[in-house]
Amino acid sequence: METIITRFVATLRKEGLRVSPGESLDAVCALAYGGLEGRESVRDLLRLTLVKSVADMPTFDWVFDHFFSPYPDGMGVDPADLLGEALANVEGMQMLGTNPEMINENLTLANVDAKFDLDDLKNPLALKEIGFDQLDGSEIHVQMKGVRGSLDAPRPTTMPCGEQPITVAFKPPLMAQKRDLTFSPQEVDEMDEAVSKMILRLKKDIRRVKNMENRGKIHVIRTIQKNYRNGMVPFQLALRRRRKQKPRLVVLCDVSFSVSHASKFMLLLLHTLHNRLMDVRSFIFNAELAEITEMLNTAPINTMLEQIDSGEIVDLDANSDYGKVLLSFKEKFLENLRGRPAVIFLGDARNNFNDANDWVLEQLREKAGYMLWLTPEDRALWKRGDCIIEKYSDWCDNVEMVKSVDELNQIVEDLFRNIYLEDEHRSRRRIERVEEEEYDYRDYYTRGSGMSTPTFDGARRFYW
Amino acid sequence: MITELKVKELLRSGGYIADEAIATAVFLALHMEKPILIEGPPGVGKTGLAKTLSSVLDFPLVRLQCYEGIDESKALYDWEYGKQLLYTQMLRTQLDNQLSSASDLSEAVDRLASEESLFFSQNFLVQRPVLRSFLSEKRSVLLIDEIDRSDDEFEALLLECLSDFQVSIPELGVLEANNKPLAILTSNGTRMISDALRRRCLYLYIDYPDEEREVQIVRARFPDVCDELAHQMVGFLRKARDLNLRKPPSVSEALDWAEVLSLLHVQKLTPEVVANTVGVISKHQADLEKVTDLAMEALG
């Protein structure tokens, strides 16, 4: 039975599930405890012990159906075999007077791993992978280790969009080409995972900093109240808490053809991010501006992209006009901006020689806590043609180039970290900086005195 | 030895209709002494399973509700500072007597140190839920509810408890469980639980039950709801779940609704009945309309 289970586990791993040796031991234990009445029962037992996430369940069912298929197509095993062996095992052990728990001792981890080796050798697939014919003994061993390693190792978390050539620059697609604007469920899942991890990291950092902030600021009255039962001896401190505030983010995203690849990923990121960490208001524009906040909250990403692509929301055939967009942003939304949001622009600032209207940015700058411009273009191209990013960048805190999803995620994470931590730190950091400037200790001792550098004598006493 | 069938019957006697997967999970958890991690949409009976198990197996239920910021002093154990302080005050004369005969300071310190263990003994230990269930006289059901609300530090803290059923207290050493509790962890999936914790548990996903089982659940709890009405109700709720509502009606809503309908002596569902009782099954302003529309369409 152990062999069958280890082979089954190996197959699961090949399909991308992460099953630890401990879990396969559990599975063997579970089967030994009985309850083996038919196929579905075995499926339940194995699923309970081997699968640890809902997302993996369909894969497990698929593997189970194929592995234990009654008409073996290569690797099929009849569940009856398993049942028979399990019963034999249990009976055998009862005869010997041992209980099923002893399996734990019989089947050590080393044992399990040794069996994988054998099974890998038996498995024609694995042999094909390493090119069995061309290798001699020792090399097989080495290669085998590699194969096993790659099976056991956690899958490298490839950045959000899987096999797509995402690290390549967002090249503007040919105008004639039909844009492929939808995402596969896998890509969406991966983005979801990446964002979840990002949020986890951020939360950890924020909590750490907040804990540090709290240190030493005692709420006297609450401390006394809390320690009343300890005779006012302050065993437990009550610290002052800051009012929790949800930072705000405003994103304006150019969806014209020239930046469509970058904006596509930006929209996916926004969709995943929406309202998980902060208040986000999102806008898209080409020649005109439209708010898509509500849509991000309700519609699935692909429907939204299709809708944008069809030109329903903003006319995609027009040339992008940043000046006009800024003007309409000022008229419609600028008054309502609250709480010093961080503002992100995504676009190449190619204005088609229209009015720049950069005075709007000046007003926006007063309302915004932070302003960031993201462009998919190289710095070298910024001064060429109709690009007016230099003009706009005067009002931005930062202008960044984004070439890949990796970079985009990194920049947004850094930004969030800044926004969250800035408020806590801003005042204090400024004071510290002033102090540093006023007291420059580098030549404090040598200033005005005849002595040069400090020395010390044998008795380790300093003198000047 | 309790078999799987027996588990199912036991749960049924407590009014909980379990499917194969649930029964198998409970059966395995009882015999392998491993915790069960239950995930699934809210209101499908994750917490209910623990409660029912505690009542039918006659194990006391120890419940730990997780929240953001929960830590070991709330979950495992805490020292009773006040009591320690009080005892020190009351024993002051005793201590004085003991120490006054000491010839010098270092001897006094030694004597005091030899009595130190008195003040960090189990007398002054407040048992929080996890430790309480470990040290209880009888095997208990330890319910760690909504673990996804806690922080990941707390999750890491639980690893030792759940894999070895022991609690390490720096001042006392390792306290092992007298009776390994039947541990049940529930999660609504608002946050990914770490792989380390998953590995230590049996993983059970409870989804919305199929129609037959849901009817059985309703009828087991409210026998006066007739079979026809129960089928109608459940069928309607199953349709409502496909509506992409903000808060889809769950089994707990089905039970609430059954109670309301039986109180109102309703024999048959009509759009009017649904419109009058819609607050029981949908809990969002935006959902109310969709559900009443569905009622017009499906029942009208």
Image (tube, rainbow, N blue to C red):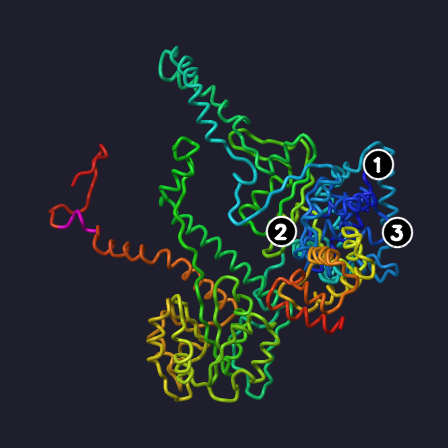
> Would you say residue A270 is visible in this rendering?
yes
Q: Main secondary structure of the magenta part?
A: loop
- Quarter of the picture containing the C terminus of chain A is top left
- Would you call the spot at circle 2 few (<14 residues within 10 Å), some (14-19), or many (20 or more)? few
Tell me the number on the disc at residue A93.
1
In the image, what residue type sits under mark 1? Answer: Met
Mark 2 lies on a secondary structure that is: helix
- The mark that comes first in sequence, 1 or 3, is 3
The residue at 39%/42% (across/down) is A222
In this rendering, would B194 be left or right of A255?
A: right
Write down the residue under mark 2. Answer: B195
Q: Which of the chains bears the disc numbered 1?
A: A
Q: Which residue is mark 3?
A: A80
The reply to whether dot 1 and dot 3 touch (C-beta < 8 Å) is no
The amino acid beneath tag 2 is Asp
Q: Position of residue A289 (x, y in %)?
A: 47, 81
Q: Which residues are magenta?
A: A442-447
Seen in the picture, residue A67 relative to A408 is either above or below; the reply is above
Which one is in front in this view, the residue at disc 2 or the one at disc 1?
2
Chain ID for label 2?
B
Seen from the viewer's position, the closer of residues A422 and A154 is A422
The secondary element bearing badge 3 is classed as: helix
